[in-house]
Image (tube, rainbow, N blue to C red):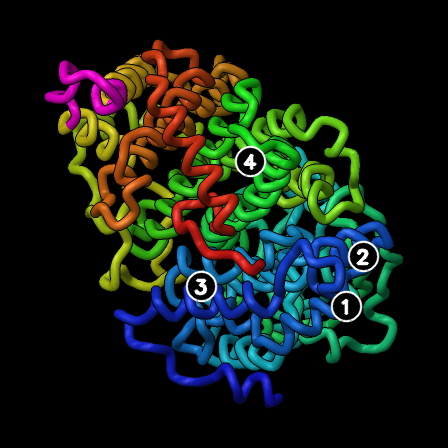
Amino acid sequence: MSAIAETVKAPVAPQGRWEADARARADRLEALLGDPYDPANPHGLGALFAADGRRTPPAATEELLSGTGLAAEFVPAEEGGLLTRADLLARALRPVFRRDVALGFGHGITSLFATGAVWAAGTSAQRRDLADVLLGGGRAAILHHELAHANAILRDEFTARPAEDGGHRLHGRKEVIINASRADAQVVYARTDPARGPRSHSVFLLDPAEAGPGAVRHLARVETTGMRGALFSGLEFTGRYVPADALVGGVGDGVTLALRTFQVNRSLICGVVVAAADTVLRSAVRAATTGRTGPVARRWHKALTGVFADLLACDSMATVALRALGLLPDRAHVLAAAVKYAVPDLLRENLEELATVLGGRGYQHDSPEYGALGKLVRDLPVAGLGHAGTASCQAVIVPQLPWLAEHAWFAEQEPPPELFRGGPLLPPLDYTALGIAGGGDFMAASLVASTDRLAAARGVGGRIAALAQLAEAFTAELRALRDACRGLPPAGAAGADTAALCVLSDRYSLIVGAAAVLGVWEAQDGTDPFLADAAWAVLALSRIGARLGIPVPDVPDECTRQVLDELIRRYRSGHSFDLDATLLAQ
């Protein structure tokens, strides 16, 4: 085992210290990466943008991340790593994603995406071997099966045919795999049954060094529009032998394992790309304030405050989904899909708004101060898997809507308050406990409960009254959605209107987002006066409501002023624009 592994494979702090330890590691990483705007910083945005322009990974920064033992974040604590709660993992990774989404994938969470199946269903030997790879500074690559609406990453797949001794032989070719050329472990989703269905695929854990001669061919690197600094290339298997003990779970478990682990991946992606959007908003605030001694020009108020409120809403959605994976693991699958469905679209709209503030500066692609917009515009579709990612979320949400309408909405108890406020008693992420069907809808129950508590405030005026009206509007939208979903034919059945079902999933995902905002606002204890005030929640919910096309009250001027003041305060004091308001390296 390497020195890195010996360093990080140490007893994890007691449960009550998990949050403080994760934030301390994030702060340490933020400091090590340094001031992103310092032109002399080898890990600053200038150096990272230059590497992106060369279409090469930023070697110095990858070396730094390896030296910190970043891969230990993806290994469960019981296997000697640092992974406890999923929401804390997102916080620990944000310093990387704040600077470069491609770096975060290429030297980061792709390994977690690969290893999830092993943490969920691997043998003790498989878990131990994979933990040793990551704790030793290695990488794991995921070789996806093909999905409907596949993009380059999700196109093509491998087949595994039984061998004479109980093992399998892999065949097939896949052109686009992240880290295919430098992975120390490969997790392969291979077709083991030619028939379509839930038992069509199996998962195998491979050591690339054990491939026989001539059984594997590395394909040329693929140039991509987004994440240009990540290493995408391909693999071709021609009878690559896989021993029986490489099978993860049982034959035919691949689809189930994908559904269980994808909810972690979806939620985590949303939790970390918020940090990348934070950097673009910082660029826009810089553009709106540089050279001005007075207040920000009024023409930029709507865009800047709106995007800030949206970032807080996206962080609320992602954080709630990540906490649900540990707190309500058998019921989090629909929430994870809804959040992944909504957040990338919200961020894409935000980038369009910020482009109007940046103007010509947004085309300064090599500029540390202003180049983040163009880079995230390219990287975000790859991070979210584009249309394939949207379609896979719809495939989770749509079949559940008729059942939820009949049995869950307006009939359940609200979830535990820890879902929205965190705390030392939140349980860890347990891949083995994740469910993929049923479980009701605790977010709808939370929305209804929040609305009931706010009802008395409708007549008091001001921002609280506006918040109460917004809560009631979203609850009314949930009632309308219930009526629309009752009696729907199953997706794919004769007479089912696929386009209409997709529109219903749009509406549902935004309702979930509203419930997350209300839940997070209600959970505030006053430690952060800005988040405890209703101004940001009113603005965030008004924007979500406008996207839904539901009636929303006018946003009080005092709300916009307060949100703008907080935005400028955080910008000038060097704090992040998310729920944590983290002090950033300067």
For mark 4, what is the residue? Answer: 344
| Residue kind at label 4, given as amino acid type | Pro
- Tell me the mark number nearer the camera, choosing from 4 and 3: 4
Lower sequence index among marks 2 and 4:
2
Task: Place residue 96 in its image quadrant.
Answer: bottom right
Q: Residue 49 in magenta?
A: no
- Tell me the mark number nearer the camera, choosing from 4 and 1: 1
For mark 3, what is the residue? Answer: 120
| Residue kind at label 3, given as amino acid type | Ala
Q: Residue at x 28, y 16 (%)?
A: 473
| In-front residue for pair 240/455 | 455
Q: Do the residues bearing badges 4 and 1 touch, measured as CB atoms within 8 Å?
A: no
Around disc 3, counting alpha carbons within 10 Å, would you say few (fewer than 14), some (14 to 19), or many (20 or more)? some
| Label 2: which secondary element | helix
Residue 453 location (% of width, % of height)? 14, 29
| Label 1: which secondary element | helix
- Tell me the mark number nearer the camera, choosing from 3 and 2: 2
For mark 2, what is the residue? Answer: 51
Q: Which residues are magenta?
A: 454-467
| Label 4: which secondary element | helix
| Label 3: which secondary element | helix
- What residue occupies the far top of the structure in this picture? 551
Real-space Cα distance between discs 2 and 4? Answer: 25 Å
Q: Residue 463 in magenta?
A: yes
Around disc 1, counting alpha carbons within 10 Å, would you say few (fewer than 14), some (14 to 19), or many (20 or more)? few
Q: Do the residues bearing badges 2 and 4 touch, measured as CB atoms within 8 Å?
A: no
Q: Residue at x 87, y 72 (%)?
A: 214
Lower sequence index among marks 4 and 1:
1
| Residue kind at label 2, given as amino acid type | Ala
For mark 1, what is the residue? Answer: 59
Q: Do the residues bearing badges 4 and 3 touch, measured as CB atoms within 8 Å?
A: no
